[in-house]
Amino acid sequence: MPDAYDVVVIGAGPTGENVAARAVRGGLTAVVVESELVGGECSYWACMPSKALLRPAAAVAEAGEVAGVSGARLDPPAVLSRRDEFAAHWHDDGQVGWLEDTGIDLVRGHGRLAGPRAVTVGDRRLEARHAVVVCTGSRAVLPPIPGLADVVPWTSREATSAHRVPGSLAIIGGGVVGCEMAAAWQALGARVTLLARDGRLLPRVEEFAGGLVARGLAAAGTDVRLGASVTAAHRPADGAPVSLTLDDGSRLQADEVLVAVGRAPRTDDLGLDSVGLEPGSWLEVDDTCRVRAVADGWLYAAGDVNHRALLTHMGKYQGRICGDAIAARARNGEPEITAWADHSAVPQVIFTIPEVAAVGLSLEQARAAGRNVRAVDYDLGSVAGAELFADGYTGHARMVVDEDRQVILGVTVAGPGVGEMIHAATVAVAGQVPLRQLWHAVPSYPTMSEVWLRLLESYGL
Amino acid sequence: MPDAYDVVVIGAGPTGENVAARAVRGGLTAVVVESELVGGECSYWACMPSKALLRPAAAVAEAGEVAGVSGARLDPPAVLSRRDEFAAHWHDDGQVGWLEDTGIDLVRGHGRLAGPRAVTVGDRRLEARHAVVVCTGSRAVLPPIPGLADVVPWTSREATSAHRVPGSLAIIGGGVVGCEMAAAWQALGARVTLLARDGRLLPRVEEFAGGLVARGLAAAGTDVRLGASVTAAHRPADGAPVSLTLDDGSRLQADEVLVAVGRAPRTDDLGLDSVGLEPGSWLEVDDTCRVRAVADGWLYAAGDVNHRALLTHMGKYQGRICGDAIAARARNGEPEITAWADHSAVPQVIFTIPEVAAVGLSLEQARAAGRNVRAVDYDLGSVAGAELFADGYTGHARMVVDEDRQVILGVTVAGPGVGEMIHAATVAVAGQVPLRQLWHAVPSYPTMSEVWLRLLESYGL
C-alpha cells in the first residue's frame, strides 16, 4: 500500500466509509484508518445490536395488542443470539470485504494527525494530497459521580453487547439510549429502574413523546423516576450489586448500572494539537464538513465528531456530501450540494415501546428560533389505521407550521409502529412542500398515515 | 325537516359524508339520503372489516418472522369478533350521531333523481338549491358464468362479513379484493384456491408486487392458479359444496365461492334517465366532480361512481373538494382547489401478506403516457431496517423517475410492513419534489424507509 493518498479518513464507521466511497467514486484514492472494528459504533455497539434487541420486543408488544392474536412471547437467549448475528459476532470481515470491493485501502491502528495533511498510525506516516477527514465519532460521557467509575458501569457499548440478562439494571439518563435500553432489557426480563435527571424523558423532542414512553415503560414494569440524580455509587465486591445513592438520600441496588447521560467527541488522542486545535474538542465545520479553524481547508470532520447531529443517518449524509465536496475541490470546483438538512430537517426514530419519530423543529425550538409558528395536534389513536393496528391504540402527532411561509418546520409522532411514518414528514420538511400542495398527498385508507389528513384538516385546510 | 336544501347528497358513505360536511362548513345546508347503513361500504363491508380481519393475521406473520419471538397464533373466533367490533356490529348509530353533530340531515330510503335539482325518496321530494351529489358507490360485478348466480356466491360483502370460516373457499379474481380475502381466510383456516384469469396477480400494479403476493399466499397454503378461468358453477344442493368447472376442463370443489372480478356503478336505479343520462353508467366528471353531461352544472358525482379512483381515501378527497366547490359556486366564486391528484398521485395500500403499497404511475403506465422515464429498482430485503424487521425479509421497491422534469412519477413497494412507507412517496409525487431536493430528505437509520437512499444512490445521486 502506498503512503500517499488523495484522502485519508480516520475512522471506518458508516460516516468514514461513506466519505471514502464517495471520494473514490469521484476519482480519488482513499485510505481509512481504524483502531477497532471496520463498521464502527453503529454496526457493533449501537444501532444494529440495539434494534436487533428491540424489534423482537416490539413484535411481541404489537401482537399482544391485537385481539385475536395470542401466545406471542420473547425467548431471551434467542433474542441475544439474534443480536449477535446482527452485530456480525463482532467480526468485521464483511465490512472489510466491502472496503476492498469499493477500492478503499484500510490501515489498522490508531490514527493521529501529525501536522498538515499528515496522519501517523504507529510507525507509519500517511500523507493526504487533498484532505484528511476525521470520522472518529463519539463515546459515552462518564459523569463525575463519586465512585461511579469504580463500579465499572455499562455504557451504550455494554448495554448493546451484554451476553447475560442482569437481574436488575439501573439506568442513569432518560435520553434516547436510556429509554431504548430500558425497553429492551425490561422486555428481556431485567428489573429496570430508569433515573432521569430532567422532569421528563427524551428532553430533546416534543414533551408528549417522553410522556408516552414513560407510560409505556411503566406499563412494562420499569420503575421510571423523573427528576432523580445519582450522587454516589458503590459496589462492595466484584459481582455484588451496585448501590446507588440518589439526591433525595434514598438508595437503590442494581446488578448493573448503565450510564447514558451524553456523548463526548473521540478527539482526545487524535493529535489535534499538531494542527492548532484543542484535544478533546468537538470539531466545528461548515456545510461541506470542512473544519473552519484550520487553514488551507485540508481538514474535514464528519459524523458525531462535528456535533451537528449525532445520528448514523446524518453522519452518512454528511459523509456523502463531504466525500463529494473533496472530489469537487480536487477538480478545482466547488460542491453543488451542502449539508443544509443538518440545520432544519434532521429526522430520528427512537425505537422505544411505543416508538417516537420526529423531524425538524419542535414547537419549542421553532419558537426559540423566532419563527412565527402554529402547532397542530392530533390524537393518533382516533385514526382508523391506528385503531386497526392495535386495539386501544395510544399515540399522538404534532405538526409545527411556519405561518409566514406555509410550510412544515417539524413533525413528531409517538405510538406503536410509527417509525416508518416519519419519512413522509422528512420529505415534506426537507422538500419544503407548501401546505396547499400537501392537501393533494392523500394518505391511503386505512393507514396510520391518515393522521396527515387530520392534521391538515385541523389546521384549517 | 325541510324539503329544500342547498345540497342533496345521495349516499352516506365516506364520500357523501365528506361532501355534506364540507358544504355545511362552507355555510350551506345539506341532507344525505341513504338506503342502507350510514357509513357505507367502507365501514361495514370493505376497508374496516377487511383490515380488521387482516391485521391479526399480519401481526402473527410478522411475529413469526422475528427470531426470539415464539408462540404467536391466531384465534379465529376472536378475530371474527374483532371484525364485528370494527364493523360496529353493522349498526350505524355512531355515524348517525356524527351527522347530527355536523349539522347534516339524514333521510333514510332509496334516493332517485327526478329531473333537475330534484330527488325523490319514496313519497318524499327533496329540492336542491345548489347541487345534487351522487355518491352511491359501486357494487361487485357478477360475471356471466353459467350457473354462477344460482350458487349464491360471496361478493366482497359476504367475504368481509361472514360469521363462519368455510372449510374451503374458491376465489374468482386475482385483484385487490381476491388477494386480500385469500390472505385473510387462509389465515383463518379455510383451504383457499385463488383463480386469477390473468397470468399475474394484482394486474394494476408493478408486476413484482403480484409475484411477491403470489409467493406469500402459496407459502401460507393457498392454491394460487394463474391464467385460470371458470366456465361453469353448480351447487347440487343447499349447503353442499359448489363445483366449479375451469377452462382447462378440470373441476374444483369449494364450500363457498367469492366472486371478485370487478366493480359496477350503483346507478341503475337512480333515475338517471330523468336527467338524460343512461342508467347503470359511470358518471364522468370534471376535476370539481361536476357531471360533464348535465346542463347548468347542478349535478355532481364523487367517489367510486365517477370511476376516477375506486378507493375510499380518493372518494373522501373528491368529497372534500366537491363540497368546497359547491360552496364556492354558491357564493358565485370558483373553487381554488381541484382534484388533480386523481390523475397522477393516487396511492393505495393492499393489505396482503406481504403488503403492497403504490402511488402514481407504474413504469408501464408512465411509458404508455409517453413520458421519458427511468425505473430504479432496489431489493428491499437488503436494507438494514428490513432485515431487522423480519429475519430473511423479502421485498422490493421501484421508483419511476420523469427524466425530463427530474421528479418521481410513481413508487411501488412490496414486503412485510410497507403500508406506512408509501405516504413519503405520495408526498414526493404529489409535491413534485425534485430529486435533488429529495437527497436532503434523509431516511432515519435503521428504518425500512432507507430504501429511499438506496433508490436515489442507484439513480446516480
Image (spheres, coloured by chain):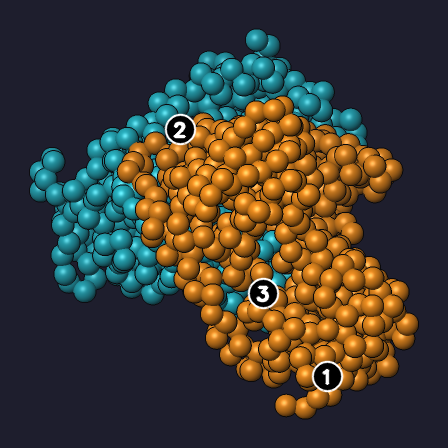
Chain colours: A orange, B cyan
Q: Amino acid at mark 2?
A: Phe
Q: Return the residue at label 3.
A: A40
Give x and y (percent) for residue A354.
51, 37
Q: Return the residue at label 1.
A: A126
SS for dot 2: helix
Give x and y (percent) for residue A203.
68, 36
Residue at 79%, 65% in the rendered image: A289
Residue at 82%, 83% in the rendered image: A331
Q: Amino acid at mark 3?
A: Gly
Give x and y (percent) for residue A69.
31, 37
Q: Amino acid at mark 1?
A: Leu
Which residue is nearer to you in this view: A360 or B132?
Answer: A360
Q: Chain of mark 1?
A: A
Residue at 55%, 39% in the rendered image: A234
Which residue is most to the front?
A237
Q: Which mark is residue A152?
A: none
Say whether residue B257 is visible.
Answer: yes
Left or right position of B275 against B263 = right
Mark 3 or mark 1: whose residue is earlier in sequence: 3
Q: Which mark is residue B86?
A: 2
- What is the number of callouts on the image? 3
